[in-house]
Image (cartoon, rainbow, N blue to C red):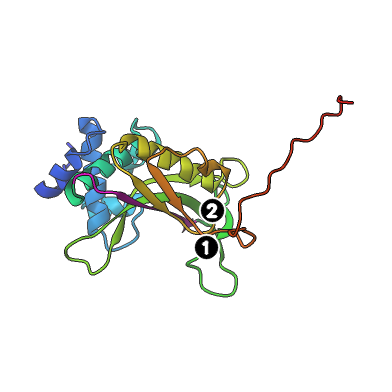
């Protein structure tokens, strides 16, 4: 019989509030979260099993299958997490401060899905470029009593596929729309860096504001000039 992980009751109660897993999947998820917190090494799948003390009693396939074939939705998990954060850390009716950014995970394998040479703002040296996979992340900014400054709690993330999938801006806009629908009673003030601007942000919901850096050729002193429609070639 497989050993069961020892999950702190307070943590288990918190994970049960997410409500997106079946009972078997919840046990696996709780074990991986516990291992992710407890491990002192890399937070890989095998690293999380080691941190939870299950490396010798659980088959590694049980953990890998959870990510590859188990039916659960990362978006739904993120929405449940966002509601938990809002209920526990924000006052009723408070505006949601949302941050958008992307992060690069270094990957060296030639067959890693969606891996490519990409910009890495955390890289050292004159060329901030590394090979890896890039995730667009959306987080809610909150103030915690034990921190001297606000912190961003990630709630949703999606993989960006260079050249084949939607752009980073389109991915961010899609997640923001989903978050805005699920928190339709609140206003969302979204902030992002200069990489996040484009036409995909034009159709956000009315309860969303989006702030980013303007392009260098922006004109702020007047409205855009009126451009008459081009005459059709069939006219005249």
Q: Position of residue 38 (x, y in %)?
A: 22, 58
- Disc 1 is placed on an element classified as loop
- Disc 2 is placed on an element classified as loop
Q: Quadrant of residue 216?
A: bottom right
Residue at figure coordinates x 56%, y 41% from the top left:
166
Please name the residue that numbered disc 2 is placed on: 109
Furthest toward the left, the residue is 9
Q: Which span of residues is magenta-colored?
A: 92-106
Please name the residue that numbered disc 1 is placed on: 120
Q: Which mark is residue 79?
A: none
Q: Main secondary structure of the magenta part?
A: strand
Residue 65 makes an appearance in the image: no
Given residues 171 and 233, the one toward you in this image is: 233
Name the side, left or right, on which 168 lies relative to 92: right
Mark 2: give few (<14), some (14-19) or many (20+) Cα within 10 Å: few
Furthest toward the right, the residue is 236
């Amino acid at each position: 019989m497989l050993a069961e992980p020892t999950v702190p009751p307070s943590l288990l109660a918190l994970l049960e509030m997410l409500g997106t897993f079946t009972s078997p999947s919840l046990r696996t998820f709780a074990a991986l979260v516990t291992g992710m917190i407890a491990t002192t090494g890399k937070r890989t799948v095998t690293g999380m099993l080691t941190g939870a003390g299950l490396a010798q009693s659980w088959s590694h396939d049980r953990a890998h299958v959870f990510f590859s074939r188990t039916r659960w939705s990362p978006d739904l998990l993120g929405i449940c997490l966002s509601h938990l954060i809002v209920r526990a850390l924000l006052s009723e009716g408070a505006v949601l401060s949302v941050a958008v950014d992307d992060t690069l995970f270094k990957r060296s394998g030639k067959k890693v899905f969606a891996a490519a040479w990409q910009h890495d703002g955390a890289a050292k040296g004159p060329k901030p470029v590394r090979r890896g996979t890039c995730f667009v992340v959306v987080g809610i900014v909150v103030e915690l009593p034990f921190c001297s400054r606000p912190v961003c709690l990630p709630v949703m993330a999606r993989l960006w596929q260079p050249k084949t999938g939607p752009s980073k801006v389109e991915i961010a806009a899609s997640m923001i729309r989903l978050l805005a629908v699920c928190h339709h009673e609140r206003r969302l003030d979204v902030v992002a860096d200069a990489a996040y601007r484009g036409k995909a942000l034009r159709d956000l919901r009315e309860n969303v504001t989006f702030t980013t850096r303007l392009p260098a050729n922006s004109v702020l002193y007047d409205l855009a000039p009126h451009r008459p429609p081009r005459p059709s070639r069939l006219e005249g």
